[in-house]
Image (cartoon, grey):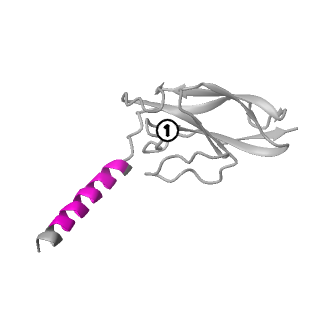
């Protein structure tokens, strides 16, 4: 019986920690992100600069837990936004800018590509509701 109670207590503790870990950070009121350049439909070279913009939210490096701050993630050719309650993936389609960068030079293969920004909190988690830009299309030469 004592072992059962210990296991039940441990299970309860772990469940509580997992609920806290997956709790999304509330989005700052009025917060917006947008792609300053390139413009939607632009033709660009294989290596080009993307400039990020924000409104009513401050930028801070990943790990900085200052309230109402976040950092950019550039979503490239992503059809669906990253899942709520899960960190934004780190792969070729999800570029992280955890030093609070406001622009980046990226390189893409020739063809049509989509770009979209998503602001992540201190732990690379999407805000609730997600703070995302309009998705734009670029034509890479």
On screen, residue 83 versus residue 106, left or right, reads left
On screen, residue 106 versus residue 102, left or right, reads right
* Residue depicted at 70% across the width and 48% down the height: 77
Across and down, in percent, residue 58 comes to: 46, 25
* Residue depicted at 36% across the width and 29% down the height: 67
What residue range appears in magenta? Answer: 6-21
Q: Secondary structure at mark 1?
A: strand
Q: Nearer the viewer, residue 8 or 124?
A: 8
- The residue identified by callout 1 is 120
Question: Residue placed farthest to the front in the image?
Answer: 3
Residue 9 belongs to magenta span? yes
Above-or-below relation of 138 to 14: above
Q: Nearer the viewer, residue 47 or 11?
A: 11
* Residue depicted at 84% across the width and 32% down the height: 45
Where the N terminus falls, by quadrant? Answer: bottom left
* Residue depicted at 64% across the width and 40% down the height: 116
Above-or-below relation of 45 to 81: above
Across and down, in percent, residue 107 comes to: 77, 36
Q: Image quarter for residue 11?
A: bottom left
Q: Image quarter for residue 128?
A: top left
Across and down, in percent, residue 16 comes to: 26, 55
Question: Residue placed farthest to the right in the image?
Answer: 141
Residue 91 belongs to magenta span? no
Above-or-below relation of 123 to 99: below
Q: Main secondary structure of the magenta part?
A: helix
How many residues crowd mark 1 within 10 Å: few (<14), some (14–19), many (20+)? Answer: many
């Amino acid at each position: 019986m004592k072992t059962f109670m210990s296991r039940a207590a441990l299970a309860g503790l772990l469940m509580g920690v997992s609920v806290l870990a997956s709790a999304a950070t509330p989005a700052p009121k009025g917060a917006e992100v947008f792609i300053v350049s390139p413009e939607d439909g632009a033709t660009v070279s294989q290596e080009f600069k993307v400039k990020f913009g924000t409104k009513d939210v401050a930028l801070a490096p990943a790990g900085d837990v200052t309230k109402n701050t976040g950092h950019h993630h550039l979503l490239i050719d992503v059809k669906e936004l990253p899942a709520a309650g899960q960190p934004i993936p780190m792969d070729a389609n999800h570029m992280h800018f955890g030093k609070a960068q406001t622009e980046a030079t990226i390189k893409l293969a020739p063809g049509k590509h989509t770009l979209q920004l998503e602001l992540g909190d201190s732990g690379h988690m999407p805000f609730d509701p997600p703070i995302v830009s309009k998705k734009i299309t670029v034509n890479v030469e």
